[in-house]
Structures are given as C-alpha cells and as structure tokens.
Image (spheres, helix red, strand yellow):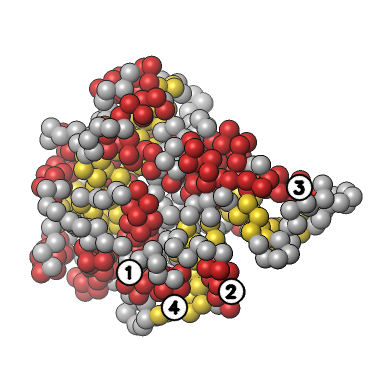
Amino acid sequence: MTDLEISRTIQLDKIVDVAKKNGITEDDLELFGKYKAKISNEFIKKKEKEKDGKLILVTAINPTPLGEGKTTIAIGLSDAINKIGKKSILALREPSLGPVFGLKGGATGGGLAQIAPMDDINLHFTGDIHAITSANNLLAALIDNHIFFGNKLGFKKVIWKRCLDLNDRALREVEIGLSGEKNMKPRKDGFDISVASEIMAIFCLSENIKDLERRLGNIVCGYNDLDEPIFAKQLKAEGPLTAILKDALKPNIVQTLEHNLAIVHGGPFANIAHGCNSVIATKLALKLGDYVVTEAGFGADLGAEKFVNIKCRKTGLNPSVCVCVATLKALKYHGGVGKDKCTEENLEALELGIENLIKHIKNIKEVFGLTPIVAINKYKNDSEKEIELLEEKLNILSIPLSLADVWGEGGNGAIDLANKVIKLCEEKNSIKFVYDDNDNIKTKIEKVAKNVYGAKGVEFSEEAIESINKIEKLGYKKYPVCIAKTQYSFSDDPKNLLCNNPFNIHVSEVILKNGSEFVVAKTGKIHTMPGLPKVPAAENISVNENEEIIGIF
C-alpha cells in the first residue's frame, strides 16, 4: 500500500476533538473542514506566560535519493512519547508543491507515522503558501507600477524577484515589460520558488503581526543611482502585504494517524532558505506540550545549522536533544555504493559512509553544543552485522543509538527512541553559535564552511566581495548568514559524497535580506528556482472515479 492509501485506512478524529484534548476549545479555532484548523491569536496570547516544554530537534545526514525518513521519524517519535505517558506536540513545516510534483514527493511522513489528511496538507492545505506567493508578487507589481508612473524613488536596479510554488527552471531568468506601452521599461527578471522567497523567511521568523509588518516594510527592493537601498515601506507596501498574510500567520493544526496534535506552519527549504517552521508555531507548541518534536530541513549541515545560528539566535530557543536520522542504505550510498545495491550487505561501504554520520554528530555535539542521539530508520532486511558495526563506531564516541520502525509500527516502533530521548532531555547542554554577531560577513561564512562543512577555505567571486562590502557599509554586518548550498554533500559539489579530499566552498553571490534580517550566500551551482526531474512525480498524480486524489507519495 502507498502512504496515501495507508493514511486513508485510518478514521481521523475531528480536529475540534483533537484540539480539545490539548486544551484548545472550538471557539479558539478557525475551521477548514473537519480535519484542519487555524488557532486564533487570542488563544496564543492566553498561553504566552505558561511554562515551556522541552524542545527536541530532528535532523539527518546528507540526504540521498533513497530517502532517510526524517519527518517520518519525527512523527513517530512524537507519537511514541505520547504512548509512554508524556505529552508531546509536533511542530513541522508545510510541504511545498515543488517537491510534491517533482522529485521528493510529499512531506507528511510515511507508513503509520504520518500527519493527515495527507493529500490536503501536501497540496493547498489552508492556503498559507499561496498567500505568501501573492504577497511576494504584489510587492513585485508595486515596484514595476512605481517605475511605470515616473520612478520617483529612482530605482536603478530592482533586486526583488517574483515567485511561484512549483519547480520551473524556465523561469529562472525572464524578460518582463515587453508590452510596448509608454513608460514600460523592459528588464531582465527571474522567479524564485515561493519557499525561497524572503517573505516566507519573514513569515517564519516573525513573532507576531506587528513584527511581520515591520519586517515587510524593511525589505530591500532595489537600489537607486547613489547605490542606496530602496525599502518596501517607501512604496507603502507593508500594509497590503500584511493584510494578505494576516490569516496565514495563524498556525495550522492537524493530527497524526494516532490522533495526536501536530502544528504545521511555514515551509522554507533548508538548502536555499533557512529551513525551519514558524517561530509562532514552535513557541505555541512549547506552551502546549511537555515535549515538542520539530525538524529542520535536509542534513544537519543545512537545517540544523540554520536552526541554531538563525532561529535560536533570534528567539532564545534551545533544543534539549538533537536526533540525527539515517538509514543503513543511505550510509552505504555515502560510502560509494550505487543506489541499486544499497540493500545488499557491504560492511566496507558502510564503514566509509558512517563518516558522514560521524561528521554530523560531531557538529551537533561539539560545534552546536547540543546533545545528540542517532535514530536509524530501520528496514526489515537490514543486516545484523551492519547494525553491530554502526553500534561499535558510535560506542567509541559515546553516542546513543536507537533503531526505529515507525513506518511499519507507528509510535510503537519508536518506544526505545522515545525513552532514550526523554532521558537525554534531563542532561544539561549549552547551545553554541558558530560565529559571533560582531564577526564580519566574510568571517561568518568562512566559520560555517570550515567548522560545519569541513572545508579548507572559501573562494569569493568579485561580485560577492562587492556585495559584502556594500552590505557592511550600509550597517548590516551583524546579521547572521544563511548559506545556500547543495544538500547532498558537505561540499558545494553534489557529487562529492565522501569529501575525503580538501575542498573549498565557492561563494558566487551574497544578498541582503533585510526583512528576514539575515544575509544569503549562494554557493556552487545552487538555484533558488529548482527544476523538475526527467520523470516528475506529477506524472503519477491524478483523481480517481471517487474523486479522490491518488499518486502522491
């Protein structure tokens, strides 16, 4: 059975009943049918002074085409914590249509460890990402309208791109303004995917509606003849953008297949954005649960690094435990075995691939200052000898390990993991940032590259150096950095899996994101508008005779 078919075999509780078990009344909800809802601002304000629970961050090794099941483990772990008599809340990101119709598929877990309704969440959900797309494109329209009617602010260079929540490489570079109308100024432009839009980052980092409006007004749209920034507030854009996003900013709630509460809100990618769900959702979850399980996108070199150095730095959040997810298949893939042979026993390849896991674990423990545990997403044909080898390697480092089968068993398959995580939550840790606020931008990038990726050094293009100098001259040196890098490798080369030879990180472009209050550094050949694979997942998605969506995986 497919994940979608498994999801439909389980009768969901009404969302009002799931909410009620967690102290949320129907009056506190804005319903989207029987199984989805948003939580009111009034309820969020009521919970502000309550004690926080413990935060558990789920991350992973560098992803492979085989899939590691990070979100699946996060869901199963939260269900398992509830099964052992503790109160756990999930706080996850919203899926983007790009991967759903592209290569990765959906992002609601798998097997018996899912959030539901699976098809709704993976497609339009409550419309949050559509609202973000509309807000982004309204700002683009306001910019070009201003230029059309005389360009009083003196735009010489527009840096704001339009966006679309689909993978469409043809839109990476476009030419606009070709209608021939008087005052129309043709120019080159481009599209980002919506989940890489600065508005998505602002949405996820805002503490409340006023903070959202402030950040939207501070967006840098372009530069004038004097190379001075032009802000969205100079176009009076912050008001209408906030109006579009007002309802979207309220967190969404759904349920796991075991009828436990999940808050699903915001969805930036971690390879080209900061990869964490909304601050509002995470903080609310901490008020509702004794334990909150959240995840950060892709491997710990991307999602977890940004969770620590951007989200935690800005909010004061401090995860008690960091779960690093892997599979034996994925570890062998990182050891050089082709995708088709990763299910075969191969101790030599596994030993090589374990180095990827160990690098992530050392980052979590030594660089980020967090308490790590390894969760192996277990398959029935996993070799006992390979498990013994992995245990031996981790024992040397005193790193706990748990084997979890949440796909096949749901929360029951992660009881061991839950017990170990709860015990680790009692240990004290002290979160560490990779760089200081007062470091210059170049130094911040170099510290991440060397300390987290293991790079020998960083090579900056002339354009990147010019941008850094401009950003620092404008007074934004203290912002954290958000490095856009391939998810498949510690390096910026997606084919360099072993990273066993010295490598440099190549920074091609540096961009000020003043609303998000961070600086983006683009490395290698990373694109902020992905493309579809040769055989996109979209080809398998349709509607059956019962008007049910099928084919999402």
Mark 1 lies on residue: 452
What is the spatial separation of the Cα atoms under label 1 and label 2, in whole angstroms?
25 Å
- Name the residue type under label 2: Glu
Up the image or down, 442 lies above or below 288; here it is: below
Q: From the viewer's perspective, is the residue at label 2 or at label 4 nearer?
A: 2
Give whichever of 79, 102 is nearer the camera: 79
Hey, which quadrant is residue 114 in on the image?
top left
What is the spatial separation of the Cα atoms under label 3 and label 1, in whole angstroms?
43 Å
Mark 3 lies on residue: 146
Up the image or down, 437 lies above or below 99; here it is: below
Measuring 20% from the left and 58% from the top, which residue is drawn there?
A: 430
Determine whether, in the image, residue 492 is placed left or right of residue 256: right
- Sequence-earlier tag: 2 or 4: 4
Mark 2 lies on residue: 466
Hey, which quadrant is residue 226 in on the image?
bottom right
Find numbered disc 3 in the image and state the secondary structure of the residue it sits on: helix
Could you tell me if the residues under marks 1 and 2 are in contact, i.e. CB atoms within 8 Å? no
Mark 4 lies on residue: 458
Give the percent coordinates (x, y) of residue 337: 32, 70
Give the percent coordinates (x, y) of residue 45: 36, 29
- How many neighbours does mark 1 have within 10 angstroms: few (below 14), some (14-19), or many (20 or more)? many
